[in-house]
Amino acid sequence: SASRVPQLPKRLHQTSTRCPASCRLRPTLLKPVRGVPSCRMPMQIAGAGEALGPVRARRITSVALHKAVPRLVALAHACGWYHYGCEEWSFLIAAGCDEAWVAEDALASVAGDREYSSESIEQEAEIRGSILRVRFPCVDGSSSSAVGIGMMLVNPLTRGQGLGKELMNNAMGGCEGELIVLGAATKLGQAMYEKMGYETTGSVAMLTSDCFEVSARRTPDSETNASVEVKLFGGDCAPPHARAALAAFDRTATGLDRHRALDAALSTPGSQLAVAVNHASGEPCGAAVMFAGSIGPVVGDAASAEPLIIKLAASTDAPVAVKVNNHPQLVARLEEIGFQGPRLVEMTFGGKSLPGLRELNYHALLHPTLG
């Protein structure tokens, strides 16, 4: 009878303080009620450890993406990515990742067969999966543009339903003929990416270190280079010539126009821009940015890479991270002074080569999604 059908909670997404004892360590989980037609079934709270019901993936606008940041933070934390807070997601949007797809709870039970157009539903639905896409124009003529795909997250309780593949297919749609890049793929997703046609093109060392350890263990040779002097500037007040040097080195190293992403990094509160200057010529020979506890990109001559990283790492009282790509010698030197971390893989669709002078001039990623 109708009286026996559980009523839909007033708030579909609740904090852990409102969860029952069976699931107090995580947000409210919803599952279908047995015996009620699936097209419009009411929901009830799922017990701890139970798999979630079906979800729906959809593309969202940039405006909706901004509004979804708190829910994306909750998804990242559910996946163990505790370092991704509101600032990190907001940076990615500002950097150009304004194309996104999300998978939410099966709220068709509430909205019927309509799209999720209700603002209240968008605010309440818990996001179970996400993926971001960004496009950068190529400046070397190798392709019209390069497409970066990242932040492919699926709630552990929703895995095994093909959601990751669905999100990837959505993000790859409309990219025919373009270079598609996965800047840093994890072991968890690598097998799926390979089945979809991606091939490994390099490695990425995800290094982190405590600044005090770096300061204590660095040597005179690692702190400075006889031919290089490193100058530091506040990111939001860096002079035009320093910004121009960063942009020029980045274009040469990556073969891409990433000015929007670089501006977003420099606009992050507390960011710093380091520029390496050659003693002999007096000309800039490298540049790097540090923002939100991460160093990258690091671009320019090979001799400038380590001094840039050391200078930035030693300038903060907080732990720092750097994502070194395809430079094993630089990784070995950084590990000697306290950096350590896992290795991920760089992949492109069809194994296409990346543009730019990456082997010579691109030493650390700006961000895994941004390359």
Image (cartoon, rainbow, N blue to C red):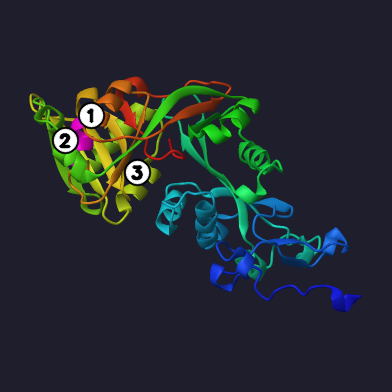
Q: Separation of disc 1 and disc 2 at Cα? A: 8 Å
State the residue at coordinates (51%, 26%).
143
Q: Are marks 1 and 3 in contact (CB under 8 Å)?
A: no
Crowdedness near tag 1: few (<14), some (14–19) or many (≥20) residues, C-alpha within 10 Å:
some
Identify the mark at residue 269; answer none if there is no mark: none
Identify the mark at residue 336; answer none if there is no mark: 1
Q: Mark 3 points at which residue?
A: 262
Residue situated furthest bottom in the rendering = 3
Identify which residue, 356 or 186, lies in the foreground.
186
Residue 56 position within the rendered picture, expressed as x and y whole percent measured from the top left: 71, 52
What is the span of residues highlighted in magenta in the rendered image? 305-311
Is most of the magenta stretch helix, strand or loop?
Answer: helix
Residue situated furthest front in the rendering = 21
| Residue type marked 3 | Leu
Q: Is residue 90 visible?
A: yes
Q: Are marks 2 and 3 in contact (CB under 8 Å)?
A: no
Q: Do the residues labelled 1 and 2 touch (CB within 8 Å)?
A: yes
| Nearer the camera: disc 2 or disc 3 | 2
Q: Name the residue under label 2.
A: 217
Q: Earlier in the sequence, mark 2 or mark 3?
A: 2
State the residue at coordinates (46%, 53%).
89
Identify which residue, 46 or 237, lies in the foreground.
46
Q: Separation of disc 2 and disc 3 at Cα? A: 31 Å
Residue 3 position within the rendered picture, expressed as x and y whole percent measured from the top left: 86, 79
User: Looking at the picture, does residue 360 appear above or below residue 107?
Assistant: above
